[in-house]
């Protein structure tokens, strides 16, 4: 007999949650620290985004401001680069680093960067897998003698979330590398400011690492709970 919501494997979920909380706290504290440092050339993050896109020969991407705090993103479908309220009009080194990172995704899109294309293609599949995974696992476990294959299918559907997180890692790290290179080559930030921007982007990247680890731990927990039952 097993208790899927109250068992020793739940410690894996707790560890994942703690890792995510620590990573989130670290990126926020790092951003707040360098958000107090204004770049010497007086650029706003929006100025930098438009400058990078223009210098990269990207003329089909719009830049807009959206609500929220650090909700910045690039949408490859709509070709819109969105900067959050706290970033868009800021002249801080931290904000410029964030804006440049999102521009890095736009450059990836322009150059048909393979991991980005793979991640985009995976989105509908992963979303579908996430919706049906738990129902399949539970149905398969309850009616195991009649539907043993459902447990296995459900487990692998859930595992797609971890695979998606793994594919996301090179996309995010590459976008940050491109961002720092562009900021340096275009002399947008001074050398010491680049070091600060790199610290912000490194902290942000750690949140994706934490998310991947947390996803792996969740997958491991489900395999421990239901995979053993499947083998039996």
Image (spheres, helix red, strand yellow):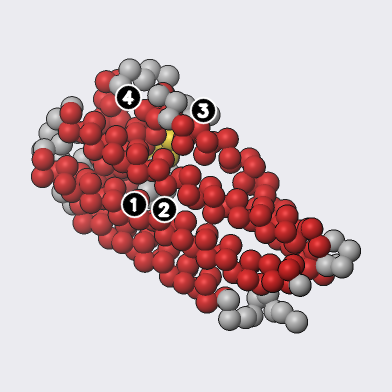
| Above or below 205: residue 6 | below
Q: Which residue is painted at 42% across and 59% down in the image?
A: 210
Q: For mark 2, does the 10 Å Cα neighbourhood hold few (<14), some (14 to 19), or many (20 or more) residues?
A: many
User: Which is nearer the N-term, disc 4 or disc 2?
Assistant: 4
Closer to the observer: label 4 or label 2?
2
Query: Which badge, 3 or 4, comes first in the chain's sequence?
Result: 4
Cα distance between the residues tagged 3 and 1: 24 Å
Real-space CA distance between mark 1 and mark 2, rounded to the nearest whole angstrom: 7 Å
Q: How many marks?
A: 4
Q: Are marks 1 and 2 in contact (CB under 8 Å)?
A: yes
Q: Residue 65's quadrant in the figure?
A: top left
Q: Is residue 177 left or right of residue 5?
A: left
User: Which residue is tagged 4?
Assistant: 53
Q: Secondary structure at mark 2?
A: helix
Mark toward the start of the polypeptide (3 vs 1): 3
Separation (CA) of disc 3 from disc 4: 15 Å
* Residue 78 badge: 3
Q: Which residue is found at the position 31% from the left and 61% from the top?
A: 26
**Residue beneath label 2, please?**
208
Crowdedness near tag 1: few (<14), some (14–19) or many (≥20) residues, C-alpha within 10 Å = many
Q: Residues within 10 Å of mark 3 (few under 14, many from 20)?
A: few
Disc 3 on helix, strand or loop?
loop
């Amino acid at each position: 007999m097993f208790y899927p919501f109250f068992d020793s494997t739940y410690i894996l979920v707790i560890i994942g949650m703690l890792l995510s909380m620590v990573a989130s706290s670290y990126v926020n504290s790092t951003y707040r620290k360098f958000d107090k440092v204004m770049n010497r050339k007086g650029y706003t993050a929006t100025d930098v985004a438009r400058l990078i896109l223009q210098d990269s020969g990207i003329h089909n991407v719009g830049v807009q401001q959206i609500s929220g705090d650090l909700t910045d993103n690039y949408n490859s479908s709509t070709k819109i680069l969105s900067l959050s309220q706290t970033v868009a009009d800021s002249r801080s080194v931290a904000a410029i680093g964030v804006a440049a990172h999102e521009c890095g995704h736009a450059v990836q899109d322009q150059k048909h960067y393979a991991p980005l294309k793979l991640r985009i293609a995976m989105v509908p599949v992963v979303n579908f897998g996430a919706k049906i995974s738990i129902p399949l696992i539970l149905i398969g476990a309850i009616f195991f003698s009649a539907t043993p294959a459902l447990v296995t299918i459900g487990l692998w559907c859930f595992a797609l979330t971890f695979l998606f997180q793994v594919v996301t890692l090179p996309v995010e790290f590459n976008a940050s590398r491109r961002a720092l290179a562009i900021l340096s080559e275009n002399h947008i930030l001074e050398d010491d400011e680049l070091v600060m921007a790199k610290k912000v982007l490194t902290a942000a990247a750690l949140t994706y690492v934490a998310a991947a680890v947390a996803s792996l731990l969740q997958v491991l927990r489900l395999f421990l709970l239901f995979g053993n039952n499947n083998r039996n």
